[in-house]
Amino acid sequence: MKIDARSIGKVLNAPDAWRFVLLHGDDSGLIREYASDLTRRVAGSLDDPFRVAALTRETHDRFAEEATALSLDGGQRVVWVREGSDSLAGPVSSVLDGVGSALIIVEAGVLPARAKLRKLAEARQDSASIGCYPEEGRVLEGSVRRMFGERQVRITNEALGWLVTQLGSDRAGVRNEIEKLALYAGPDHELDLEDVRVCIGDSGSASIDDSVFLALEGDRAGTDLALERALSEGANPVAVARVLLGHISRLRRVKAATEQGESRVEAMKSLRPPVFFKKQQSFERALSLWSLPALAELAQRTQAFELSCKQTGAMDMLLCRRHLSVIAAKAAAASRRR
């Protein structure tokens, strides 16, 4: 069966309803999280040698043996296959047609709709095909708030809004940041905006923030340094595009308000979350360099840049460097004309 996003929780909470669960997509962190959750629910842990068989690409040839083996303690076994590919479709189908009871979990990367593994999982009633793709927007906010809730930590709406603009798209990276913030807060504490900024201020996410601010104020050398730091620490170009679009949107709101007669100070104060005090001068410099039409055009070009990064085979790192370099060059040229 093909499982939609709204039904994933039901699958994870009822692993005994399935013989085969296929986890595929481009969010490797989310795939690993779902596989771990299913394994714990069935076997009680991830490393029980009698109930969990973890197979890598080098040990796929043991699949049939492990999938048909009996549990020594009587509980259900889990065969957890990593780096799955279509070469497993035949062996998995043969095991499912047999009398075994083990839960088969296969982690795969991006699979096209015509892939044999996907067709197998989606065609059978005892199998689940779950697409794992990066979360964004309100969906990401909901996941982050839920993760904090699991750790008895609260977070203000203002802090949550800022945090999701800084997080990368990979689930493992998101969870790592949540773990760090929860440890910083301790149970029954509410994180505010300043807490969050202090705690993740030295992360790759902050480097993205730096590269975006510096590009829009025309600092070409600073942009390159901050972007390279962010990319070296695991940031991806789509995350850069999201932060950039958020920054452009806030500049447009302030610019529009000032053109309607509101003071720049009051317009900036109305932003939620507010501009971090260390970034206020950079924000104001960008305001002086970009007109509303120019910001609108930049937003459209950034959306096109994000879409290009998501296309199969795209040279996303090169596209990212080029996009920010062009922005910084335009801002620098505008600064020279002033």
Image (tube, helix red, strand yellow):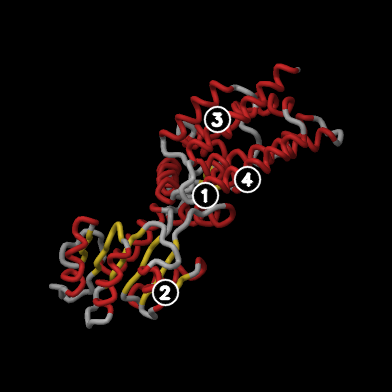
90 vs 233: above or below: below
The mark that comes first in sequence, 4 or 1, is 4
Q: Mark 1 points at which residue?
A: 310
The mark that comes first in sequence, 4 or 2, is 2
110 vs 215, left or right, is left
Cα–Cα gap, marks 2 and 1: 25 Å
Q: Mark 3 points at which residue?
A: 211
Q: For marks 3 and 4, give the one nearer the viewer.
A: 4
Give the residue type at disc 1.
Lys
Residue at 61% from the left image edge and 32% from the top image edge: 276
Q: How many marks?
A: 4
Give neighbour class at mark 4: few <14, some 14-19, many 20+ (Cα, 10 Å): some
Image position, residue 225 (x, y; %): 49, 25
- Which structural element holds mark 1? helix
Give the residue type at disc 4.
Gln
324 vs 286, left or right, is left
Nearer the observer, 332 or 185: 332
Q: Do the residues labelled 4 and 2 touch (CB within 8 Å)?
A: no
The mark that comes first in sequence, 3 or 2, is 2
58 vs 203, left or right, is left
Q: Do the residues labelled 3 and 2 touch (CB within 8 Å)?
A: no
The mark that comes first in sequence, 2 or 1, is 2
Q: Mark 4 points at which residue?
A: 303
Q: Name the residue under label 2.
A: 122
Cα–Cα gap, marks 3 and 1: 21 Å
Q: Do the residues labelled 2 and 1 touch (CB within 8 Å)?
A: no
210 vs 3, left or right, is right
Give the residue type at disc 3.
Ser
- Which structural element holds mark 2? helix
- Direction right: furthest residue: 261
Cα–Cα gap, marks 3 and 4: 17 Å
